[in-house]
Image (cartoon, rainbow, N blue to C red):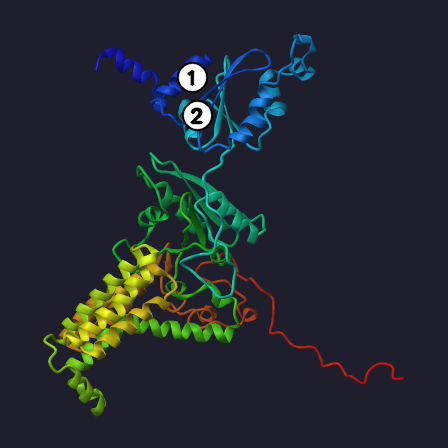
Amino acid sequence: MTASSQQSNQSFNPLATVLDRQLDANLLAIRTATGGSSDIVFRDLVLVNHRKAAIIYTEGLVDTQQLQQFIIESLTFDYGEQTTEQLPEALEERPFIEVLLQSVLRAGSIMQHSRLDETLKAVVSGIAVLLIDQYDRAIAIDLKRYPDRAISASETETVVRGPRDSFTENVRTNTALIRRRIKHPDLRIETLSIGRMTQTNVQIVYLNGVARESVVEEVRSRLNRIDVDAVLESGYIEEMIEDSAFSPFPTIYHSERPDVISAELLEGKIAIMVDGTPFVLVVPALFVSFFHSAEDYYQRADVSSLIRVLRFIGVFFTLLGPSFYIALTSFHQEMLPTQLIVSLVAQREGIPFPAFVEALLMEITFDILREASVRMPRTFGSTVSFVGTLVIGQSAVEAGIVSPAMLIVVAATAISSFVIPETSMSVALRLLRFPLMILSATFGLFGMMAGIIILVLHLCSLRSFGVPYMSPLAPLIKEDVSDTLFRLPMWANRYRPRQIAAGDGKRSNSSMPKPNATPNPNNGNSS
């Protein structure tokens, strides 16, 4: 590369160049920086005072109808043969740029930039930029219109009773869904730009005075330390800011339901919204939160408590079902009733594999079928489920590869894993099944209990943004246990979680409802 070409490239470096007063120089710099991309539109204009100008925008990210109707037509209004003296008095009494910003440009958000890097970022972000000859600033006009899908029901967090809306890929739509539910001036939304190439908008959402300021500052600090070239989904952010990167348990909660995120904000937690994804992150995250569903708070407390108990039973069966079966059938047959052990021995007659290998084969097979049903097109999903559950399962039993009892245990374990509302926790428990199966096959129930103890110790050692992961169970906070394994009525939950919320955390002054006295039908005037 020659010295002249190096000097030419340096002269058009947008990161070190301020805008020039010459319009042609600015246009050349922007064209050079964007490499002549076909979606960057340059629209030349002649303003009412005969000064040259240009509007630059990215096609597909700007509402061209509003651009034409409210900006271009206003800037190029034809005054015909009128002289300067016949122009509006405002142009004579005030500077032209001031009139332009205050009277001519009809847009909700207008900013000015003095550097080319700021101007380029605005252009590629969907903002129309107006450059005027003999003016060394760019006027950024917010007319963004991103391609977006309509608000629809959540596909991953379905409920029988409750709101049907869910977040979309547009972060502004998502913040509006939160504002719709929390109409309070203390709701704070802070914007960051993360990713050297993608410049992804990331929103920090919290309730001032409810969320702890120390946690909010910790969230800001961790996000500001991220230095990557791209952020395409909230999963990128999650891996960068989580406390325990090598733990199988998720320490950051995520949801695509606005009602769930609003409820988390009201408890003092902080939401992290990433533009381009409907999944919103929530910190700090507690272990019990991953087993709560939005519908738990839309039904009566007794019904919700029963469903939670059934859910936790399913969790234990998901984690320990195959391990418990392997330990009993391989080491502790005396714990089973005589008729049952005779039936199991008869079923296992002719099976060439031990119980551990048998369970391992079936678990891997069912995980493959589960993954295939997720990745396959929906038109083939039912076919894959039918073939996997009936054909393969029945054929394996008839071929003498697995016993019917093992097939029942593995199938019940697979079904139980679907009762966990949060997918990442379900995946973690499915992953931990395999080391527990190895311990059970090696040491029986003693090995399984040792694995459980190690698991509980690991859970108690975890923290999420400074908050104990097992709170309020460990450490035990009696006032907060009312909304963990079961749920008390709304009037009994008067306080926010003590480990999370700031201040006294009081959110309700309601007491147990008392019905009014039954009216006496004999009261009143009698004829």
The C terminus: image quadrant: bottom right
Q: CA distance from mark 1 to mark 2?
A: 10 Å
- Secondary structure type for disc 2: helix
**Residue 302, above or below 80:** below
Residue found at the very far right of the displayed protein: 527
Answer whether labels 1 and 2 touch (C-beta < 8 Å).
yes
Q: Quadrant of residue 521?
A: bottom right
Which residue matches tag 2? 119
**Residue that appears at 84% across and 81% down:** 524
Count of numbered circles on the image:
2
**Residue that appears at 66% across and 8% down:** 81
Residue 20 in the image: x percent, y percent? 44, 15
In the foreground, 356 or 401: 401
Residue 181 in the image: x percent, y percent? 56, 54
Q: Quadrant of residue 459?
A: bottom left
- Secondary structure type for disc 1: helix
Around disc 1, counting alpha carbons within 10 Å, would you say few (fewer than 14), some (14 to 19), or many (20 or more)? many
Residue 91 in the image: x percent, y percent? 65, 15
Of pointers 1 and 2, the one earlier in the residue sequence:
1
In the foreground, 15 or 418: 418
User: Given the image, on which type of amino acid does mark 2 rest?
Assistant: Thr
User: Given the image, on which type of amino acid does mark 1 rest?
Assistant: Asn
The N terminus: image quadrant: top left
Residue 271 in the image: x percent, y percent? 44, 51
Residue 50 seen anywhere in this rendered image of the structure: yes
Q: Which mark is residue 26?
A: 1
Query: In the drawing, does residue 358 fall left or right of residue 497?
Result: left
Query: In the drawing, does residue 461 fall left or right of residue 207?
Result: left
Residue 445 seen anywhere in this rendered image of the structure: no
Residue found at the very far bottom of the displayed protein: 338
